Amino acid sequence: MQDMIKRIVEMDKKARDITTEAQTARVKAERDIDARRRMIHNDLLNRARERLKVNEKTEREIAEKSWLTVSEQHEGISRKLTEEYEKYGDRWVSEIVGRVLGE
């Protein structure tokens, strides 16, 4: 009988030890998972920031090229209008004044 009680006590102690070890392992695993999660989050955040820098540079280059194209088009239109005005300006002014005066 004593031997049986002793075995039961030993089994209970072993069960508590196993439970304690499992809880310790679970807490450690949770900490490891949290640390890994933070590391992955920071890594993704850093990569996103780097990608933004690259994208910003690329977008800036595209915008500058687009601006140059539009600027060149506007300069061309402005030159053409200036040429047209120099060529036909006097006639346009005469026609406008004539229409206003009803001639």
Image (spheres, grey):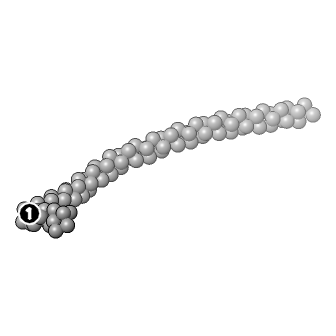
- Front residue of 6/43: it is 43
Q: Residue furthest right?
A: 1
Q: In the structure shown, which secondary structural element does the residue marked by tag 1 occupy?
A: helix
Decide which of 100, 64 is in the foreground and name it.
Answer: 100
Q: Quadrant of residue 88?
A: bottom left
Disc 1: which residue: 90
Above or below for 103 versus 32: below
Point 10% across, 63% down: residue: 89
Q: How far across and how far down the image is residue 84, in percent?
A: 11, 65
Residue 45 in the image: state x and y as whole percent.
43, 44
Residue 41 percent coordinates (x, y): 48, 43
Q: Is residue 34 left or right of residue 51?
A: right
Residue 53 spot, x, y in % from top left: 32, 46
Q: Is residue 89 left or right of residue 35?
A: left
Residue placed at 85% from the left, 36% from the top? 8
Q: Which residue is the extreme one toward the left?
A: 87
Looking at the rendered structure, the kind of residue marked 1 is Asp
Q: Split into 4 quadrants, where in the image is the N terminus?
A: top right
Quadrant in which the C terminus is drawn:
bottom left
Left or right, 98 with reference to 57: left
**Residue shown at the point (68%, 39%) measured from the top left:** 22
Residue 39 shown left or right of residue 79 in the figure: right
Count of number-bearing discs = 1
Instruction: Work out whether residue 51 can be spotted.
Output: yes
Q: Is residue 50 above or below residue 9?
A: below
The residue located at (24%, 58%) in the rendering is 66
Q: Closer to the camera, 8 or 77? A: 77
Q: Residues within 10 Å of mark 1 (few under 14, many from 20)?
A: few
Q: Quadrant of residue 16?
A: top right
Q: Is residue 3 visible?
A: no
Q: Closer to the camera, 31 or 48?
A: 48
